[in-house]
Image (cartoon, helix red, strand yellow):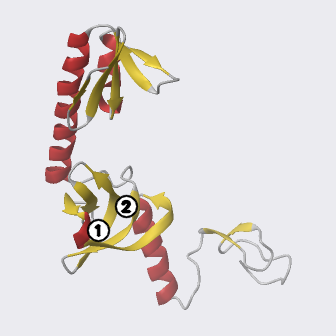
Amino acid sequence: MTIKTTTSVTIETVGRRHYLRGNTYPIKDRLRNAGAHWDPEQRAWWTAKREVAEGAIGAADTAIEQRNERERTEGVDKSAAVIRGKAAYKGKTYLLLWSGETKRGPAAKLCFRDGSKVFWADGPEVQIIKTYREPLSIAKLDRLAEEYRYQREHDGERRPGTRYECEECGDWVTAGEGSCWETGMAH
């Protein structure tokens, strides 16, 4: 068993198969086109050609570097970025995209509230303030913030047309349409 590692993909040789382990998602089409096969039991791509496996490592690193560079310069896609919570770093609050263990130790991937910049921070310097039960997008956070702002300005009223769960009857209703069957109050 021979193992060759890189920042994102590992080659593990078992018999005549060269398994590619790690973040192979950005290069899965390239692997398929090069004749590699997916092994569902191993949960890894494999190929019998060592040169295909080694070429995949370079392609994976390049794809990840390109994505990271795009994020640094363009920010994140507001509708697709997965926001896991909020974190404090050097006295400022940022959105938390990811946190965990890396080869260099604990780290967190953070972004500005508007998604304009993305950066990595050392884990010990990051304090996770809040984690969301379900991951959100920046676009969804913007919609929620707008709804809360409207409720504050209108004494707790929901914006007409907003869907919500009625606290009294438990039904999902639209604000401004109909009334609660439990209390008779307008939704």
**Quadrant of the snapshot with the C terminus:** bottom right
Marked residue nearer the N-terminal end (1 or 2): 1
Q: Amino acid at mark 1?
A: Arg
Of all residues, the one furthest to the bottom in this rendering is 155
The residue under the point 26% across, 59% down is 107
The answer to whether the residues at label 1 and label 2 have Cβ atoms under 8 Å apart is yes
Indicate the position of residue 144 as horizontal and vertical percent values.
Answer: 47, 70
Which residue is tagged 1? 113
Which residue is tagged 2? 138
In the image, 69: left or right of 131? left
In the image, 140: left or right of 81? right
**Vertical order, 24 against 19 (above or below):** below
Q: Which mark is residue 124?
A: none
Indicate the position of residue 5 as horizontal and vertical percent values.
Answer: 22, 31
The residue under the point 65% across, 73% down is 175
In the image, 149: left or right of 112? right
